[in-house]
Image (cartoon, coloured by chain):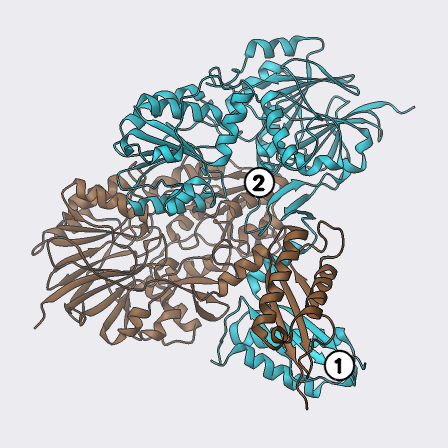
Chain colours: A cyan, B brown
Amino acid sequence: MKKDRLIYLPLGGAGEIGMNAYVYGYGPAGKERLILVDLGVTFPDMDTSPGVDLILPDISWLEENADRLEAIFITHAHEDHVGALAHLWPGLKVPVHARRFTARIAEMKMDEAGLPTDVIHVHAPRHPIEAGPFRVQFVPVSHSIPESSALVIDTPAGRIVHSGDFKLDGNPVVGEAFDPVMWHEIAREGQGVRILACDSTNIFSTHPGRSEATLAGPLTEFIAAQDGMVVATTFASNVARLKTLAEAGRAAGRSICMLGRAMKKMITAAAETGVLTEFPGVVSPEEAQHIPRENLMLIVTGSQGERRAASAQLSRGKYLGLEMREGDTFLFSSKTIPGNERGVIRIMNAMSEMGVEVVDDRGGLYHVSGHANRPDLEAVHDLLSPAILIPMHGEHRHLREHARLAQSKGIASEVVTNGMMIDLTGPAPKVVEHIEAGRRYLDGNVLIGALDGIVRDRIRMALNGHVLITVIVDEDDLPLGDAWVELMGLAGRGRSGAALADQLEAELAEFLERASAKVIASDDKIDEAIRRIVRQVCMEEIGKKPEVTVVVSRLVAE
Amino acid sequence: MKKDRLIYLPLGGAGEIGMNAYVYGYGPAGKERLILVDLGVTFPDMDTSPGVDLILPDISWLEENADRLEAIFITHAHEDHVGALAHLWPGLKVPVHARRFTARIAEMKMDEAGLPTDVIHVHAPRHPIEAGPFRVQFVPVSHSIPESSALVIDTPAGRIVHSGDFKLDGNPVVGEAFDPVMWHEIAREGQGVRILACDSTNIFSTHPGRSEATLAGPLTEFIAAQDGMVVATTFASNVARLKTLAEAGRAAGRSICMLGRAMKKMITAAAETGVLTEFPGVVSPEEAQHIPRENLMLIVTGSQGERRAASAQLSRGKYLGLEMREGDTFLFSSKTIPGNERGVIRIMNAMSEMGVEVVDDRGGLYHVSGHANRPDLEAVHDLLSPAILIPMHGEHRHLREHARLAQSKGIASEVVTNGMMIDLTGPAPKVVEHIEAGRRYLDGNVLIGALDGIVRDRIRMALNGHVLITVIVDEDDLPLGDAWVELMGLAGRGRSGAALADQLEAELAEFLERASAKVIASDDKIDEAIRRIVRQVCMEEIGKKPEVTVVVSRLVAE
């Protein structure tokens, strides 16, 4: 009989920030019983994934082994941890475990997708959940969304702490503080912590993290000092921040109006699940229109410059009857995620054109991060003193730096990226297999593979333009009339000054005239020859080699 | 007779960082004699300008008034000040004035484009150049490229100082220091400075700028402390930085090898024009292959993550026989320009995967900015005490903040963006006209208008995919056979599981069968109907509305 082993297999989140999906398994090699921690998404961009709606982990391996999967655990309700649930659950069909608030958000997603919500099970903190050979507890940590949790996972091979996303906040405004005493106990129970799989996103931030509670003073002071309307944006899911902002606004004698669906959804879920007990009363956009600007504060979505969110809408003009004016103030109570700079700067400049004062986090007075910084990570290493540390959730550079930090403190550690299956049974992590772990794209309402070539074709059309050629061949295998040319995304005229389409048609007419019967008889040969001519003419005329689609229509004798 | 007036008209650079092009004019309204200061480019991105090679100012207005243009003055050799010269000079055909190093770079551009180089005139600093009613001097300032200059422009309406890009550096390593005594004199001569048109890019940096000379110590120390090969990247044109890096490498006993064409071009131009008198000897890539890594330092292009530059090449593997290995160090002696984060981070992670130590400017030890920060700008305001300040070179938010700063000090100031023609004759700037001032795209080797719809079509294909439909109509105005469907950049199968192309063909067959003679007889009507059907079927099947091109071929009786 094979020896049982404990395995770890990230399918997303290890080698990137976003799209978290981590598998743990225990049992005989190849027959381990499995659990999945988190099932998140990441967001597309024009450079690599134009037209794509969402990016999800490719969980083909897990789908093939769905009969071995016991359950899914969701640590918190951020999109990069729960966003793929409704898209990928149908291929897994196992129970989903979460705490109240997270479960509420997950239910809403399942419900919208027409999937059952009774597969989602709500658990109190520290309540042990049996899942095959695993015994799992949700343990509160502080982060930037209510009820974030680490998982304490007990296995026959020892205790795992899966940190989830976290920070060390003794006063997080909404939800539970990070509790070092409880974590100290968790580290001392039984054999202690064997494995710590740990958030790595802020490993390069060298100062200790700051508490959410430090923002109330500066925000209250700032808002009180403004003369016009104040508009503040932050992440919709940062319920604590929404509360701090709203209370600061109320303290300055302002009515609060929330704009953006995501924000209302989060506040509602927080209230329904009892996470949020006190929140200042808010007014509707209609009511807000009748309140003097100096007595009004909007809290809006779109802190990352998203084109369709409330911030961007307000930067372009009226939104739900409200608009910004000279003398108003716009506050980013947020950090710009790398890659989103252009969208954020676009909003800042549009606001500047309206005469609106834009204030961002420069100086750190109006925003704190939700992740543990380097000294905080060290504190957690010390608190839990694991035998093995697996750096998790981060780009390669974050994982590597985190592993080095752990190693420097005498903790066994290894950089493990998506698709690497690791045996954690021995004294040090050992790679046992490489799994195909790529990405799936949600495109419209279809899931496509990232390497299917569909998005590659879009990128090529965007870079090179697209030329369509239609040729008709008659019943006697002779070209009927000239080729027809359509250009899309290409300059109409080039070097010679003549219309590019005319030039292409002339060149193709010449080709069709002299082409042998053998060429005309073969779709492939015509296609190849036309493609070559089109690219050559375009290169000469406009200096570009476009994508070419050739349609040969053959008439048949009736 | 109309009164003479002094006008200012930015055609690029005012409302953006990049693409500088500023017009000054003097004379009767509508008949002013003109000069142009700088003619730069900005760089395309996938979000807004996929497939485009360069972005240039739309200088149509200037071309229409080319007979009134006396000359072009180039302040320095950065691409955003000189990059459009060879592309746009043929529409202007006037003398170009610059200092030696800048002229050399400009000549190379003209030469490569097959344009005359003898239109470029080299001037010594402070040498007055007559250009119609203007008398212009190049006055050295410090920046991040050799021989940067401000312009002192004397006009019948008073003295203008056009700052160009600058910083206050008393020890810039290469080239002239910023000389407060000389600028004090310039401010005191005659009536003093009436107008200051001033760099605004760093208005939000609140600390005083630091000297290029402060980097030598930290860089030397850092490089000496590394065990493996050291690879450093910075802007190719920052000749002072190249020198500092090379000297730091030599001091650590390392041979220096430069990789990247742009870098060699800049070093050569600097040596040829006498700007660079001492530069450590360098080895070729071939020689470098035989030098032990611990005795080698590469200085490479690609600090902004450009995919084809040396940095990116090295991050992907071997480049010119050289490759990075575990234990090597990669240093960004540069700042990431907003919008370039993704490319830079891609390189960092690729290096991390190789086990290379990546060090960036975090902390500011290894890079200083080339632009004046807020306190430096205030020092210049005080030094020159202009009557009017025109904030120049910056996004709207920079210009606005700079204008407010000036106003707070009692200087008349106004935000003037591209296309606003300003009368500077009176006590305060006054808008007199709005000129169409957009962008042109260099696309392959063709100049197209940014609003021509060509790039819009590319973006649409990238976001929505492209469906091509061909229909043949016979001599009797009856559809001949079925419609043919080609998909590009779209999922092959959707909700129903059937092939999307088959489904479209089936729907279109049905349409063609039932379509009236009137519809079939009209290209527009067929086109419209087919487009509607295709979008509807695609929406139902895959949740996307693609771009659709319909080609109707009509057979004619012979």
At horizontal 56% and vertical 81% (from top left) the residue drawn is A503
Three-letter residue code for mark 1: Ile
Q: Left of A230 or right of it: where is B555?
A: right
Q: Which residue is mark 1?
A: A520
Q: Position of residue B551 (x, y in %)?
A: 62, 72
Q: Position of residue A442 (x, y in %)?
A: 64, 45
Q: Residues within 10 Å of mark 2 (few under 14, many from 20)?
A: many
Q: Left of B136 or right of it: where is A117?
A: right
Mark sitting on residue A199: none
Q: Please, which residue is most extreme toward the bottom here? A: B558
Q: Chain of mark 1?
A: A
Whether A331 is drawn above or below A171: the answer is: below
Mark 2 vs mark 1, CA separation in Å: 61 Å
Mark 1 secondary-structure assignment: helix
Quarter placement of the N terminus of chain B: bottom left
Q: Is residue B78 visible?
A: no
Q: Which residue is mark 2?
A: B228
Q: Left of A195 or right of it: where is B29?
A: left
